[in-house]
Each structure stands twice: as C-alpha cells, then as structure tokens.
Amino acid sequence: MTSNAEASQDTADFETALAQALGAQILDEAHVLSFDMETRSLVSASEPTIFLLELSEDALGVHDFDSLIASPGQTSDDLWNRAVAGTGPVWSGSFTASRSGSSHPMQMRSVVSVCPDGSLRLSVVGEPACAAPPATQKAPAEVDSALASLRYDAEGHIQQVSAPMCTLLGQTPEDLIGQHMRRQVDAEFGRGTAWAEAWAGLLRGERTVLDIPHRHSGHGTVWTRSHLLPLTDAEGGFAGALEIATDITRERRDLDRMRARQAALDSRLAIAEFRTDGTILEASGGFCKLLGLARADLDGASHKTLMPAEFTGSRRYDDFWDRLSRGEPVSGLFRHEGPDGRIVWLSSCYMPQAAAATGEVQSVLFVGHDMTEARKAETAAEGRLGALDRAMMVAEYDSAGRILSANGMLLDRMGHRIEDIRGSSHGLFLEKGRDKDGTEARFWEDLRDNGGFSGEIMWVDADGREVWLHTVYHPVADPEGHSDRIIQIAVDITETKRLMLDLDGKWQAALNHQAVVEFDPDGKILQANEGFLRLVGHSLREVRGQSHSSFCHGDDIRSPAYTDFWMALRKGEAQSGRYRHVARFDRDLFMLAHYTPLTDFRGEVDRVVMCGYDISSQVALERATATRAQALTAELGSLHEVNDMLRGDADLLARTNEKLQDSARNGDRLLDGALSEMRTAREAADKVTEIVDLVGDIAVQTNLLAFNAAIEAARAGEHGAGFSIVADEVRKLAERNGEAAREISRHIERANDSILRSADGTEQTIERIRAIGSMAEEAIGGLTQVVAHAGVGEAAAATLARLAEELGQAAAPDGQ
C-alpha cells in the first residue's frame, strides 16, 4: 500500500513532469493561447487553436484575452485575475471564435512564464470539455490534470492517469492503474518496432512523439499523438515515463481515408512525370502495374519506349512533344506497349508543368486511365456492328422520322435505292393511308417518350408486297443527353410470320375444341383457356395460382402414382391418359389429356401445358355398360334355363308332329276315298238327271198328245167324250210326271250342289290337312332354328357379357 505522504510526493513529481511537458512541442499540439501580462493582447497561439478560433497568424495582436476566453458567471477581469493567480488548477470556460463567434467549451489551465527579455506571459492551455468520471471512480492518487496524460513506472506499468485520459479511453482509473502499457495499446502495435524503439529512447533519456493506437472500452481504437517524456529519480536514473496525449482519431481516420483515396486513384489511374525530352522522372504504382514495369525499370526509361514504333517514328510524335514544350496540354486515347509486349490503351492527359518565374516548361505530368478493356470492347462492338450490318436490316432516322441512311440489306429487301429515299419520311414503308391518319405521328411521339420501341411491324416494299419485320427502334443521345437520332435494327420474319399465323390459326382452332391449362413446375396454374374454365365451372381469376391438386380427388392426391406423375413431368417426361378431376360443386370431370413439359434455354422444365377434352359422358356410358354387363351376366343363367326348356319343347313338338303327320296321312286317305265316292254319286246324279230330263220330255210329249187328243175328242163330239176324259187324265198324269220330274231335278240339283260343296270341302280339308302337315314340319324346323339360334344367342350373350366386363374394367379411369 502507498502512504499518504508517498501519494503526495508522487503527485508533486507528476505535476513537475507535467510542467516540463508544457514546452514548445506540447504547445504546438494543444489548444494554447499566450497573452502579454501588461496589455492582455494575444501574442501567440498553437496551430490547432488558430484553426479552431479562425485567427490570422499575421494579425494575432488585434485579439485579446477578453474577446477570446470566457467563463460562465465570471467577468473578464475576475477570470484574468484567477488565471494569473493560478487559483484552482483546472477551470471550466470556453474559447470564442473571432469571426463566427462560435463557442468551444474547454477545461483550461493557466501557466505564467518569463520570457528571455524579462516580460511575463500568461499561457492558457485548453482541452475540449468532456464529462468527468464519477467521483466514486477516482483513485486516491489521481492527478487533477487538464491534459490527457499517463505516468508509467520504469517497467511500463501505469501509476497515474488524468481524468481526460480516462474519458478518452472510456475507462476508470481503477481499470487503468497497475496495467502494463502494452495491454492499453493495439496488440500488433505493442509487438511492433515503433513502440519498442520509443521505449528504448526513453531509457536513454530521449523525448519522442509517437502516434499510438490506444484501446477504448467501447469504441475499438482511439489514436493519440503522444509526447513521451522520460522521468528520472534523484540519482538521475530512469524512473519511468510521462505520456501526454492529444486525440487525433478523427485526423487519423481522415488520413486513412485520404490514403485509401490515393490508393484507389493509384489503382485506377496511371500517373507519371516526364522531362521534356521524354525521360521518366517518377511513376505511380498504377502506371508501373499497367505497363508491366518494375521500379528498377524506371531509371533512364523513356516515353518513346512505351509507345508503338509506327507512332514514335512519325512526324506526329515530334509534333506531340513540340506542343507539350510550348505548354499546350495534349489529351486523347493512346496506345502503349509494355516491355513484355503487352498492349495497353490509356485515355491520357499530358499537362506541361512550367516554372513560376520563367514560364518555361520543366516537366510534363501524365495522367491516364486504363481503357484497354473498353477499347477491346469497342473493337468487338465495331466487329459486331459490322456483322450486324451484314446480317440484319439497319436504318437511321432523325428525330422527326426522316431517313438518314439505310444498309444494303434493307434497301435490297424493300426494293429501294438510298438516293431515292434519303430524307423521305418513315411512312414511305407503311401501308397507304397510315402515314396520313395520325398513326405514324403518334408512333414517333411514343417512341421518343418511351425511349424506344421493340416489336413486330408490317411494311410494304416498292412492289406493294407485305414485309413483316421484328424490329428495334433505339434513340441515340448526343453529349447533352438529347435524342437526335433513331437507329432501327430489323430482321425479316415474313415467312416466319406467315407460318406462325397459319400455326396460330390451327392452334386457336384446337383451343376452341380442347381444354388447355398452363402450370408451373410446382403444379400452380398460370393460364387456362375458356374451354377448361367452362368445364370446371370457374373463372380465370379463381383458378390462377391454384394447385393442380385442388382439382383432383383426395384419394388420387395421396396416391404414389400422383407423386410419380409430377416427378416425371419435372424430369421432362410427357404424360398422357384418362384423368379424373373435380369440377365446381364436387362434380366429377373425366378428361382424356396430354401433359407436355416445356423447357427453358437451359433445358430445365419451367412450364407444363395440358391439352385435353371432356370424356365424362363416355365414362358415364362405360360405367352404365359395365353395370349392364353385370346384369347381363346375371341373366345369362336364366337364358340357359330357357334354352333347355326350348330344347325339351322342340323334342316334344317333334314327336307330336310325327303323330300328326301319321294322322294326316290316314285322314288324307279316307278323304280321298270319300272324294271318290262323291265323284261316283255325282256321276250317278248326273245320269238320274238325264233320266229325269227324259221323263220330263216324255211328260211334255204326253201332255202335248193329251192336248191333241182333247182337240180330236172335241172334234169327235159325243163319240170322243170318253176319249176326252182319258186325254184329260193323261194330260193331268203328264203334268204330274212333269212336276215330279221337275221336283226330282231340283232335288238332284241340290244333291249335286251338296256333293260339289262336299267335294270342294273335302278337297279343301285335304289341302288344309296337307298344309297343317307342312306347317307342322315348318314349325318343327323353326323351333329347331329357334333352339339353334338360342344356342348362338347364348354364346353371343356370353361374349357380350365378357366384353361388357372388360369394358367395365376399362371404364375405371385413372384420376390425377
């Protein structure tokens, strides 16, 4: 532990060392104002103070203590007296700028010194005001100093630290005292030679000034410009060191930025200085790097060795140096050649440097910017433009659309000569009427407003034929940024356009009959045509962005087949088939579809297009067919039973028919006999009829004889009376015979009619019996055919059932 007496002695020693530090070097680095004790006028000021208070070194005496220093609550006289008396080692106040009147708060200390001529001066040393560390953090032996200072023992451990130094480092005295100096500086700096040499100098009793990167508790590194003063003991030996520091962190950062800027300039610019004879005086690292020069190569190197031989051997090279010798700057794009043969293009500016007194050019400053890549790009661009001119149609217009130039390809395609169209309007190439309806004027207005145009246009050549172009109109700006020319580059796509229109027509026709949807590789819907939207019952706004799975059944989505389906599409493998979808209101929708992956220029799938059509009605028919097939299969057994019954009935009918045929043949024989008897009876009746007719004739003759006898009896009178009676009886008998003959004739006629009818009926009966036999035979044959057909029908029904079953199985479509 250190006693109070020892602490007091240490403080006195530290104050003495601090007073020694206020020499010329310290005053030059701190904010110091020195005043004449008699006039209070300003005698001198440190450079930082001159800059801070806007003073002029040539007119310091016009300022005095009263105008430059102030303290709250104190008059200038009180403040002056306090400073001269030295009451209070540190006091608060402010420095006042002479021109702007801005106030700069300071922690100030005053020192009275005696000049060699015996006059007295009051020096006020100011440190920018900052919050003092809390009183509870002060070390018992802390030095109340206005300067940022540290005291080290002979081994480099911190013994004392001022409050400004604590504030500067963001630490308390307890954090610093006892620490070795190397722990308070940047690690690399502490291990470096600069710090080791500075400490070695202190051991030899030498003062030194060193820029030190101190560690800050919260802000990384604080740079200080520190004055290191050796301290000696009573015997003159080395007892330690005193560091008085000024914060130069901002200046250091500014310096780092300037170095970075210089490095950036050096990396981007080639800077060199030449004598008037072309010898290199000095060159930057950027110059050497660009031309492949080493520093050793600069000695005696000449400008001529860095330029192409065709230039240095020409009159132009002499004129170049003559102009520089006359003090004329020269600038332009120059080609240089390095010792290793490299070609470097530099955008160069040669600036003659003349002596101020004589105006004679002493040297030439060269500043160049590497344009090699730009020159290569320009050369490549010129090559591309040449190739473009040979491969594409190019035209140039003024801002009003008048033709300035056109290449041969455009002229040949349009059938014009440049002499005929130069100065003509762009509307020369358009359909008649378009250049007069305002369309052309609006086109050029839009072109100027939108900064160009790219797309397809239709021109008309000299023969009136359509020419389709894919073209780009690009405005070309002048140095002021105004577009004064328009460059057009075009490709003839007439044949392609015709083909595309034909294909588009066919495609639109296909679209009108198919459902088309476009997906991204993740299955999100990008576009859909009206055919698809009509099938699913949604609008494009509703389906865009929806997943393909939103139109599929849940069972299908969860199946491995669905995952494999999209994996195959992402691999570029097309998929085709019958797919089940879900339309609006959970309606089943079956589609026969083809999914085609589309790839980008890298060959990666970026879209999937589905084309398909609705087969829901077909699927419904197939399902109905499948259902009917099941019913048909069920009825097939019944058909077997019916066929068996038909076979049994056919056998029974065949046996019955045989019996019927036998009965028919017997009946036919009986009827044939009856018919023969009827014919015999008819013949007998015909003979009786003949006899009856003969009897009738005899009766007529008898009646006629009786009439004649009556006439003769009448003539005989009484002698013929008996004869008359006989004649009358004979006549009556004859009449009765005639009447009987007629009655017999009538009966015979009726008998003949009956016999005829019986014969006819018998013949018809025979025919009918025969017809019945034929019909029975035909029935047997028909039934046999029915049985045969039933067997064929049974086989056909079995085949139909099998086909229906297969169709039913095919009617179960896959659903993606």
Image: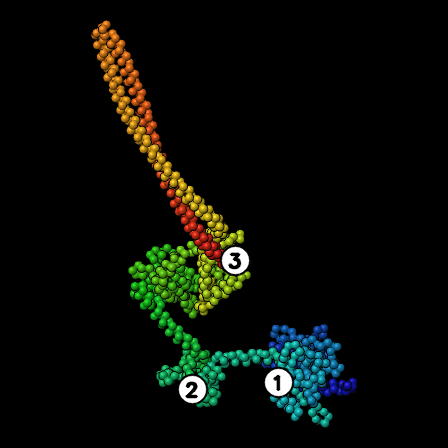
Whether 531 is drawn above or below 209: the answer is: above
Numbered label tally: 3
Whether residue 220 is visible to the viewer of this picture, yes or no, is yes
Residue 189: image tag:
1
Secondary structure beneath label 2: loop
- How far apart are the two marked residues, 3 and 2, measured between alpha carbons? 74 Å
- What residue is pinned by disc 2? 339
- How far apart are the two marked residues, 1 and 2, measured between alpha carbons? 40 Å
Question: Which amino acid, by three-letter code, is at mark 3?
Answer: Cys
Q: From this viewpoint, which residue is outermost toward the bottom?
A: 235
Density class for disc 3 (Cα within 10 Å; few <14, some 14-19, many ≥20) is many
Which one is nearer the viewer's eye here, 578 or 506?
A: 578
Q: Is residue 445 left or right of residue 16?
A: left
Residue 145 appears at what percent x and percent y? 70, 81
- How far apart are the two marked residues, 1 and 3, measured between alpha carbons? 72 Å
Q: Is residue 178 left or right of residue 523?
A: right
Residue 566 appears at what percent x and percent y? 50, 63
At a point 25% along the width and 11% down the height, the residue shown is: 727
